[in-house]
Image: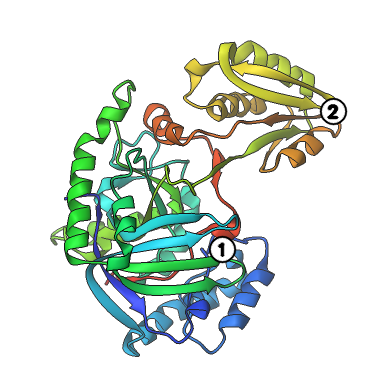
Amino acid sequence: MNAFLPADILFPQVESMEKWAVIACDQFTSDPAYWDRVRKNAEGAPSTINLILPEAELGTEKEAEHTALINQTMAQYLKNDIFTTYENALVYIERTLENGSVRKGLVGMVDLDAYDYSTGSTSAIRATERTVVERIPPRMRVRRDAPIELPHILMLADDHEKVLIEPIAEQKNELKELYDFELMEGGNRIRGWLVQGAAADAFNARLTEYTATVGKKYEDLNGVPMVFAVGDGNHSLATAKSCYEELKAKNPDQDLSMHPARFALVELENIHDEAQVFEPIHRVIVKCDPKALLEALQKDACAENGFQVKWYIGEECGTISLDKSKSQLAVGVLQGFLDEYLKNNAGEIDYIHDDDALIALANQENAIGFLLPAMEKSQLFRGVIADGILPRKTFSMGHSREKRYYLEGRKIK
């Protein structure tokens, strides 16, 4: 059985798709006004805002109130026949981004038995960054009794030859179009087509062949090859996994091999899609002795012909050569050094997206900034396979408003 499969997909039958679809719950966590606008915009209409808990509400008085309403509303939507079910189906998606490019994706379900988020995992599906286990229990409280799930997980394939999703894109005019509309709050346009029958079978066949041969790309690495990586929404997928493991532990004598909780709905994307952009996340260390930190870095983590990384201290700047033997990625070498150095020395680290912001922050007293290069797309899988997991804040997949919006669903009870 492949690790990514067609599913019985719930699709909303609503008057306004714009009011139905809202952005991933882990966005705009410091902007409660965003979520207030979403609720006001969707007021009185069926909407996924009534089926998810924005992380901006975690730890607030709204958390318990809205958590109690979520499962009740899910059951009500099912009772009121809000959804149509497309059996054994996939959904091909085209999402227009801020720069006008179009990112392709495919909605289906993953086998949670093929996913392991722990550091050093050798499973077919792996996390790209460390999972903060403390973030899972609040999400489990929402999912544990939920009758349906809605995904904001973006899963990645390292598909150089573009054999998985792109053939579906070429035949989209032969498929049934499910939706075409503008997403709320500046999310831009999204279109979706139903993939069933022969088209779904053909995809399954291509994925089976792809899975059987994917390891050949990584034969020069010591680690165990993988098929997919979680790009966004790993804590949501980890929550699904935790709920499934909890269910198995409570029912040791039951055969749960085909229970719907074994699977989770995701959107699969190809990192080699031209619209898929990985942006670097830079490092600035404040409240430190910047010259001492730079000297220690040069002594402990640099080598000739290494990764070239630019540093800034006030008006000064220069380039260091980070030792490639320590990691597949420049950020891996730097973060590994910083983690150890800051255990015994003064300094606080922050993660910065924009070049100009990094340089400005490094210009303050007792600060040093490192301008990291953009990660090559092929380095993502190689880094996880070789190093076990990537350092936190390694890369960003596009801007906040380009994250996945909740649209399709699936029964998990």
Q: Amino acid at mark 2?
A: Gly
Q: Amino acid at mark 1?
A: Glu
Q: Is residue 124 left or right of residue 15?
A: left
* Residue beneath disc 2: 314
Asked if residue 330 shows in the view, the reply is yes
Looking at the image, which is closer to me, 218 or 63? 218
| Residue drawn at 62 percent across, 72 percent down | 35
Is residue 219 positioned above or below 379 on the image? above
Q: Is residue 21 left or right of residue 170?
A: right
Picture coordinates of residue 337 (x, y %)? Answer: 60, 23
Place residue 145 in its image quadrant: bottom left
Picture coordinates of residue 168 (x, y %)? Answer: 30, 57
| Residue drawn at 58 percent across, 61 percent down | 401
- Mark 2 is surrounded, within 10 Å at the Cα level, by few (under 14), some (14 to 19) or many (20 or more) other residues, namely some
| Residue drawn at 32 percent across, 56 percent down | 170
Q: Is residue 96 left or right of residue 299?
A: left
Mark 1: which secondary structure?
helix
Q: Nearer the viewer, mark 1 or mark 2?
A: 2
Picture coordinates of residue 206 (x, y %)? Answer: 21, 47
* Residue beneath disc 1: 55
Q: Earlier in the sequence, mark 1 or mark 2?
A: 1
| Residue drawn at 42 percent across, 85 percent down | 14
- Mark 1 is surrounded, within 10 Å at the Cα level, by few (under 14), some (14 to 19) or many (20 or more) other residues, namely many
Place residue 228 in its image quadrant: top left
Mark 2: which secondary structure?
loop
Asked if residue 147 shows in the view, the reply is no
Is residue 358 positioned above or below 146 on the image? above
Q: CA distance from mark 1 to mark 2?
A: 36 Å
